[in-house]
Amino acid sequence: MAEEGPLARAEQTVTVTESAEGVVLAPANPNGQGLVFFAGARVDPAAYADKLSGVAASGITVVIARPTLNFAIFETRPLATWEGLAPGVGSWAVGGHSLGGVRACMYAADETNDVSGIVLFGSYCSVDLSGTGIRALTFIGGNDELSTEAKIEAASDLLPADAEFVTIPDASHAQFGDYGIQPGDGPQDADDADVRDAITDGVVALLG
């Protein structure tokens, strides 16, 4: 479940609308860019609202997908399912946390999708995007004991050569969202505001 405090904080920053398909973070002054983001396995999409609220406040419309059975890896619907929730967006990127990021890579690899960039939170690809020229950014949690830095580095050759990697010191795997403690993860020693700010700065720089 999404923690109530961070969700309420996001609602004070941007317009948050929930539906059967997902959660839309709508900026006051949209810039025509959008991000479809896929949650980690069994994680409520609303749990990412606060961490992505700064991205939305910058003008980028964020659609956090509510996937089939709450497992993005099982999702078969087209990317247009979530793009349609924000019809004013002209350019779309994809992203995701953990297994949600794995699925985002698959959408990016599908040539029928016009994807401008990909953002991974504690995640890595299982398909080859190295020849696509897509803009890519991966966030690594310094205390992430699930998607470790070693695992992410081992799959880095599947991303374009100019892909960026940003380590957020002391951040655990679960701190990429706000849904509590995850078994097997490292300590949540990072300040959540610092995690949010790092995500905002990195994504805005990539897509801006």
Image (cartoon, rainbow, N blue to C red):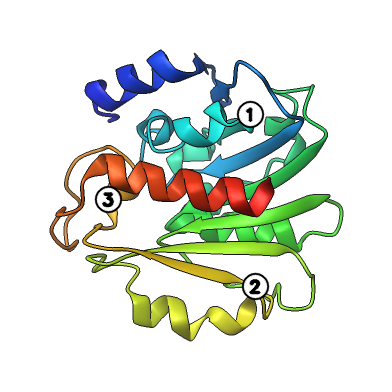
Foreground of the two, 128 or 62: 62
Name the residue at 79% across, 22% down. 88
Q: Position of residue 1 (x, y in %)?
A: 27, 30
Q: Is residue 24 left or right of residue 109?
A: left
Q: CA distance from mark 1 to mark 2?
A: 30 Å
Q: Residue furthest right?
A: 112
Q: Residues within 10 Å of mark 2 (few under 14, many from 20)?
A: some
Q: Tag 3's secondary structure?
A: helix
The residue that label 3 is drawn on is 174
Q: Position of residue 62 (x, y in %)?
A: 59, 32
Q: Is residue 74 left or right of residue 173?
A: right
| 91 over 136 or under it: above or below | above
Disc 1 residue type? Gly
Badge number at residue 169: none
Name the residue at 64% across, 56% down. 118
Choose the circle earlier in sequence order: 1 or 3: 1
Badge number at residue 127: 2
The residue that label 1 is drawn on is 59
Choose the circle earlier in sequence order: 1 or 2: 1
| 117 over 57 or under it: above or below | below
